[in-house]
């Protein structure tokens, strides 16, 4: 499929002004008894949902007249009633006419919506012809648990659903790749009737998070992790609090973190809170990406994707998709920050080295009472980097750029040599560096994973060597206070935590995305709270 270059104006005009109301948040009730569902309704309202979906097929026992009356009348929120049959991925395997009777009864008892499957929609809608209460709407749904068909096939499906007499079209497909969501976004933007478009599965998450951007009528958010009604469904609480769902509009800029895996990243928490704190019309989402090139080709609009952070395993591959690369990032051979310029081109940075080096410079500044106007306190320093992986490269190039004399020590000497050659430095093995102290007042930066959780008793250098260093930095941030840093402190060295590198690279990313200074205190508070 082609790229999703939907401009804001496209979205607004193509919906012909129909998208007047914001996307509703619906929480499915998955209780197995009426009492459980009543409790869940209360919680859904507390969380901030707009609608509850009563999943009749989840009830172990069901007395239509009595139970529906209780559930619909006592609901503190408008109700959507669904009784999903087995043949459409639900739990109901009883008589079809009884199922449709229950849905008709729900309509008469005041449900705001019922959801009926496309296969039986004609029959159901005919049966209620002329009897529909005002403000009652029929959602006609189609679920595909295998894939997301072509745009043409989805278009045909929408036409069939519309022809059935649906008030609201619902299409749920399955994401095999994050770019599958683009086809559903296009359908939602161009649909002439209110549409619910969902791409199920982890790779379809953005179809839910960004549903307000593309004018979805409604999306689903679970009450709790164990109560999702479809694969990949986020929590209602996360939609509202983590992703600022209510603030997303058609012209909202979309940022995110691309990686695989990516769900563990705390970046959405930091960036969304930061955007909200200054009223920026932007959202930052988790982007589970398999194929970076396909991702950037598909989401090529200036507002989507407006920029992204980049993590494992894409830091090197993504380089090939960029129009412009910061010279140091190019030398390091890895990027972690990508910004789309107004002309649509992509520029990449490596903010890891900026974060680490600025933290080390500030630490040395404290030590020397240095004046920043004089230049970097790293200039002329002997700078020993342990490790030659991604973080090692960032530190070695960053320090060399500031005029430090760089030594790279690594378990695999070949890798140390390769990096040392590139930065004009010296290479050592980890054993050799233990006896290496040509002078005092050196700077040490550990970028190996030695000492990282769970092996927190390990350290990459013996304590007795540390007296030759005036400053010790450890890139590891789990735990924050590593054995290396504890022993360095005891040896009277200034220490710089890996968390400082982590947070400062975030400040830099924020600046690149927005052109604004990051709200540093907010970032720090959130990092501490969610460590
Ligand atoms: P990487 O590319 O995989 O490199 C790992 C490095 O550690 C290599 O030099 C490797 O040596 C060395 N190493 C691994 N196990 C070792 C062992 N048992 N003994 C001696 N050396 C060993 O990883 P990376 O991305 O650079 O990350 C390295 C560390 O930095 C991790 O703890 C990571 O969490 C941290 N980090 C922190 C930040 C931050 O913001 N604070 C950012 C990035 C990374 P070989 O070459 O011999 O394999």
Image: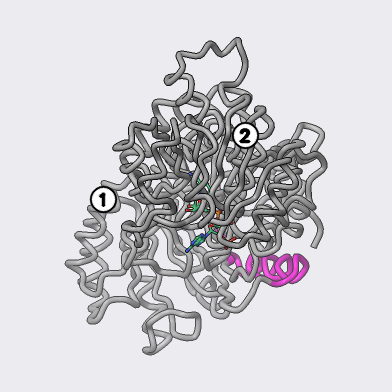
CA gap, disc 2 and disc 1: 61 Å
Question: What residue range appears in magenta?
Answer: 149-171
Does label 1 point to a residue whose CB lies under 8 Å from ligand 1?
no
Q: Is residue 128 left or right of residue 185?
A: left
Q: Secondary structure at mark 2?
A: helix
Q: Is residue 157 visible?
A: yes
Q: Is residue 1 left or right of residue 217?
A: right
Local secondary structure at mark 1: loop
Q: Which mark is residue 97?
A: none
Q: Could you classify mark 1 by the number of other residues whose Cα lies within 10 Å: few (under 14), some (14-19), or many (20 or more)?
A: some
User: Is residue 158 a member of the stretch shown in magenta?
Assistant: yes
Q: Looking at the picture, how far across and down is residue 24, in whole percent? A: 46, 48
Question: Colour scheme of this structure image?
Answer: one colour
**Residue highlighted by disc 2:** 399
| Residue identified by numbered label 1 | 76
Q: Nearer the viewer, residue 169 or 33?
A: 33
Q: Position of residue 224 (x, y in %)?
A: 31, 60
Q: Residue at x 75, y 69 (%)?
A: 150
Q: What residue is rendered at 45% in x and 64% in y? A: 131
Describe residue 314's horizontal placement relative to residue 232 as left or right: right
The residue shown at (38%, 52%) is 236
Whichever of callouts 2 and 1 sits on the residue coming sooner in the sequence is 1
Picture quarter with the N terminus: bottom right
């Amino acid at each position: 499929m082609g790229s999703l270059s939907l401009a804001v104006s496209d979205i607004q005009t193509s919906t012909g002004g129909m998208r007047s109301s914001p996307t509703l948040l619906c929480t499915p009730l998955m209780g197995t008894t009426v009492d459980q569902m009543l409790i869940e309704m209360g919680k859904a309202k507390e969380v901030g949902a707009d609608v509850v979906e009563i999943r009749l097929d989840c009830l172990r026992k069901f007395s239509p007249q009595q139970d529906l009356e209780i559930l619909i009348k006592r609901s503190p929120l408008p109700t959507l009633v669904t009784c999903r049959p087995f043949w459409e991925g639900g739990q109901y395997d009883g008589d079809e006419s009884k199922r449709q009777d229950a849905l008709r009864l729900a309509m008469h008892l005041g449900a705001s919506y019922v959801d009926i499957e496309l296969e039986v929609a004609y029959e159901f809608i005919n049966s209620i012809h002329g009897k529909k209460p005002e403000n009652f709407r029929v959602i006609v749904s189609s679920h595909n648990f295998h894939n997301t068909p072509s745009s043409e096939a989805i278009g045909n499906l929408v036409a069939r659903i519309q022809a059935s007499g649906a008030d609201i079209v619902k299409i749920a497909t399955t994401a095999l790749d994050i770019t599958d969501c683009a086809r559903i976004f296009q359908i939602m933007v161009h649909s002439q009737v209110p549409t619910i478009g969902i791409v199920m599965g982890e790779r379809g998450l953005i179809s839910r998070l960004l549903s307000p951007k593309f004018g979805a009528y409604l999306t689903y958010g679970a009450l709790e992790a164990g109560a999702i009604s479809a694969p990949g469904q986020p929590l209602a609480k996360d939609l509202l609090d983590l992703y600022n769902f209510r603030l997303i509009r058609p012209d909202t800029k979309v940022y995110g973190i691309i990686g695989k895996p990516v769900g563990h990243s705390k970046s959405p928490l930091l960036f969304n809170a930061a955007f909200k704190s200054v009223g920026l019309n932007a959202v930052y989402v988790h982007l589970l990406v398999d194929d970076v090139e396909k991702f950037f080709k598909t989401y090529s609009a200036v507002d989507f994707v407006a920029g992204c952070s980049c993590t494992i395993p894409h830091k090197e591959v993504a380089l090939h998709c960029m129009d412009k690369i910061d010279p140091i990032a190019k030398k390091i051979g890895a990027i972690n920050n990508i910004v789309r310029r107004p002309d649509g081109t992509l520029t990449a940075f490596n903010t890891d080295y900026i974060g680490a080096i600025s933290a080390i410079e500030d630490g040395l500044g404290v030590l020397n009472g240095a004046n920043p106007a004089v230049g970097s306190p790293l200039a002329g320093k002997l700078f020993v980097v342990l490790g030659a992986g991604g973080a090692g490269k960032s530190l070695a190039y960053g320090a060399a750029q500031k005029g430090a004399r760089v030594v790279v020590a690594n378990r695999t000497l070949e890798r140390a040599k390769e990096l040392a050659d590139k930065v004009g430095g010296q290479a050592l093995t980890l054993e050799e560096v233990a006896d290496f102290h040509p002078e005092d007042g050196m700077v040490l930066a550990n970028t190996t994973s030695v000492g990282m959780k769970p092996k927190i008793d390990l350290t990459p250098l013996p304590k007795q060597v540390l007296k030759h260093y005036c400053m010790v930095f450890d890139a590891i941030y789990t735990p924050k206070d590593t054995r290396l840093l504890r022993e360095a402190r005891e040896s009277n060295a200034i220490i710089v935590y890996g968390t400082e590198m982590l947070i400062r690279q975030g400040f830099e990313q924020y600046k690149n995305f927005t052109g604004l200074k990051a709200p540093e205190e907010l970032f720090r508070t959130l990092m501490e709270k969610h460590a």
